[in-house]
Structures are given as structure tokens and as C-alpha cells.
Image: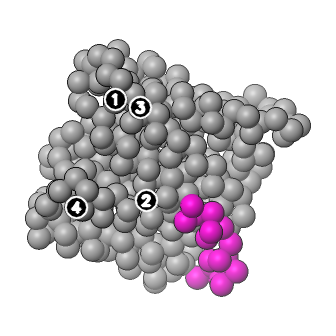
Amino acid sequence: MTAGAALALASAAAYGVSDFAGGLLARRIDLRVVAVVGQFGGLVVALAAAPLFPGRWDGESMLWGALSGLGTAMGMLFLFRGLSRGAMSTVVPVSAVGGVALPVLAGVLWLGERPSVAAWVGVAVAVPALWLVSHGGDGAGGRAAGTGDALIAGAGIAVQYLALAQSDPVAGIWPVVAGRVAAVLILLPLLRGTGERPRPATVVWSLATGAAAAIALICYLLAGREQLVVIAVVLSSLYPVIPVVLGLVVLGEKLTRTRTMGLIAALLAVALLVFD
């Protein structure tokens, strides 16, 4: 396994844990609180990690990072809104499909990347795998709830991935910092009128979800510098497998035949992309 593939899979794991925890919180407290406080947690982690990676100020890269933060703000806001309304095993994978399909198309058409045949097969398997994972016998109402929010979140996630990948490696991971600052500035006004004072425990958990998401972005950024952006995006976008597995173990959800097929297909996609 290459370093880039390992980093991309680490990104998927961190994102999966972040979405699972954030989704649970969004059902208990105002989703805007979860989104805003989470971005503060991400900013702290990004600032702490930035000096550990060689980099210097690069204005263009900072702008790409800020645009990535705009995508993050849109993605997280609508993702948490979808999670507060619909089934986690539906909303997260549906958002991931948009988050992976758009960057892959852009990588090929705009960036001129040319994945190998095995990688293309992996991409082709990954997208339906995410759809299969999202259908687990939750019922028609469960599948429909939150789908619109998930699609909008997917567009935001795609912007996040694509913009961050355009930053110059000389900037280190400072573009991730720029993205967290932009996300905080965009989301902060939403706290007006919430009228909610979250308990310290929920604040800590919200900070932790944002911290995990920031770690995921750092891993993704580093992965994209080791290999094709297309491959990094697809591997990172396999994060819905984590909420599904955690739902089985922690929430006691049932592993249906359809969801099992999706998990197997996701593992096949990982094998094709990792060992390409």
C-alpha cells in the first residue's frame, strides 16, 4: 500500500467517525451549534498541526483553502440538517456520492488526470457501493428523509475536496487552516437566534467532531500530493462505511443483504484503488 493510499484511508476513517458523532449530536442539540463549534475544534487542530509540516505563506493556496472552507461550511450545515431529519445510513452515503462523483469528473476533465484501468474499475465500483450501503431496509420514508440535504451537502464536499487539492505543496497544510477560518466566519452568524446554551459535554463532543474532520482534511491534502487527486478523493469518500459499521455495533442496526453487498463492493473498490 502506498503512503498516499494509507493517508486517504485514514482520512476516510476520521471523516466517518466525525460524521457519526456529529450526526448523533445534531439530533440532540441545534445543528448550527454542532457545525459552528465543530469548526472551532477543527481550527485549533489545524493550527496546532501546521507548524509540524514544512510550509510557507502562499496567497493563492490560501485562497484555495478559503474556498475549500466555503465548501466545508455548506457541506457540514446541510449534512447535519439531513442527519437531524433522516437515517444516518442514508444521508451520509448519499452525500458521499456527490462528493466523490464531481471531483472525479473534474479531475479527468479539468485537471487532465488519467487513472489506470484498474483504478477506473475501482471508481466504477465505489459509487454504486455507496448507494448500496445507503439502502438497508429502512423503509421508503427513511430513505427519502434528508436526501435533498444530502445532495446539497455532497456538492459542498466536492468543492471542499477540489479546492483544497489545488493548493501548492509549498504551503504545507496552511490551506487547511485558511479553510477552517473561512468556515468559522461563514457559519458563526448562524448562531444568532438559536437561544441555546449547550452543556459543556456537548460542546466538548462538538469540538471533537470538528477536530476529527480537520484531521481527515489534513490526511486528504497530504494524500493528494502523493497520488492522483481522483484516487485520493475516492478513497477518502469511502467514509460512509464507518457510520454504517458503527451503527451496527453501537446502535444495534441490522446488517441487511443490500447493505452487506455495499460493504463488500466498497472493500473491492479499496483493493482496486490501493493496490493499483
- Name the mark on residue 108: 4
Report which quarter residue 86 is drawn in: bottom right
Q: Residues within 10 Å of mark 3 (few under 14, many from 20)?
A: some
- Name the mark on residue 99: 2
Residue 261 screen position, x and y as percent: 38, 79
Secondary structure, magenta segment, majority class: helix
Q: For the magenta stretch, what is the residue range?
A: 137-152
Residue drawn 39% across the image and 36% down it: 64
Q: Is residue 149 magenta?
A: yes
Q: Residues within 10 Å of mark 4 (few under 14, many from 20)?
A: some
Helix, strand or loop at mark 2: helix
Residue drawn 19% across the image and 69% down it: 120
Name the residue carrying label 3.
Answer: 63
Q: Earlier in the sequence, mark 4 or mark 3?
A: 3
Residue drawn 11% across the image and 65% down it: 116
The amino acid type, in three-letter code, at marker 3 is Leu
Name the residue carrying label 1.
Answer: 60
The amino acid type, in three-letter code, at marker 2 is Gly
Mark whose residue sits in front, 1 or 2: 1
Residue drawn 43% across the image and 54% down it: 158
Q: Is residue 247 left or right of residue 37?
A: left
- Dots 4, 2 in contact, CB < 8 A: no
